[in-house]
Amino acid sequence: KSLTEQVTNNHSNLTHLYSEMQLSMAGGLEATEAQHRGTLAEQAAKFQSSLAEQSTSLRADQINTFSKHRQELEELRAVHKTEQVEVEVRLNKVVEEKWGPLQQEVNDNHAHIKVLHEKLQTAVM
């Protein structure tokens, strides 16, 4: 072969190899891009799943906290009611203890007033 044919042949081979390399690189880039898209989609799905789990967990924590606070409130109400009943019992006892002597004092005063009234009427007549 002549030198011109060899150069032309080599040039043609190099052009062909260059085209194949470009196609190969483009295919590689597309494959890499597709792989990255897949990885990103996978990471996004994991992130969404994690967010959903956190949301569910947070909601469960809120429900548990609400239930706990509600139970504590009910316990405080029960304690308050018990204390209120105890206070009413003590007040009623004090009233009963004071009522008898006060009633007696009123009766004694009434009897004394009646005696004084009778003495006054006798003295006036």
Image (tube, grey):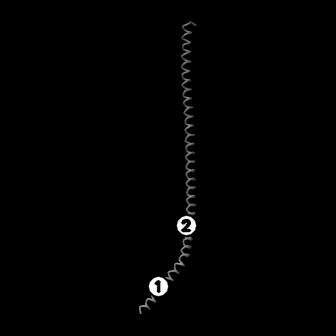
Closer-to-camera residue (103/90): 103
Closer-to-camera residue (87/36): 87
Q: Earlier in the sequence, mark 2 or mark 1?
A: 2
What amino acid is found at the position of numbered circle 2 in the picture?
A: Gln
At a point 55% along the width and 43% down the height, the residue shown is 51
Q: Which quadrant of the structure image shows residue 35? A: top right
Closer-to-camera residue (78/96): 96
5 up-or-down from 71: above or below: above
Q: Nearer the viewer, mark 2 or mark 1?
A: 1
Closer-to-camera residue (79/86): 86
Q: Within 10 angstroms of label 2, few (less than 14), some, or many (20 or more) residues?
A: few
65 up-or-down from 99: above or below: above
Q: Within 10 angstroms of label 1, few (less than 14), some, or many (20 or more) residues?
A: few
Mark 2 element type: helix
At a point 46% along the width and 89% down the height, the residue shown is 119
| Residues tagged 2 and 1 counted as in contact (Cβ below 8 A) | no
21 up-or-down from 55: above or below: above
Q: Which quadrant of the structure image shows residue 94? A: bottom right
Residue 36: percent from the left, percent from the top?
56, 32
Mark 1 element type: helix
Labelled disc at residue 19: none
Residue 29: percent from the left, percent from the top?
55, 27
Dividing the image into 4 quarters, which one contains the N terminus? Answer: top right
Q: Which residue is mark 2?
A: 84
Q: Cα distance, mark 2 to mark 1?
A: 41 Å
What amino acid is found at the position of numbered circle 1 in the picture?
A: Ile
Farthest residue to the left: give it: 124
Farthest residue to the front: give it: 123
At a point 56% along the width and 53% down the height, the residue shown is 65
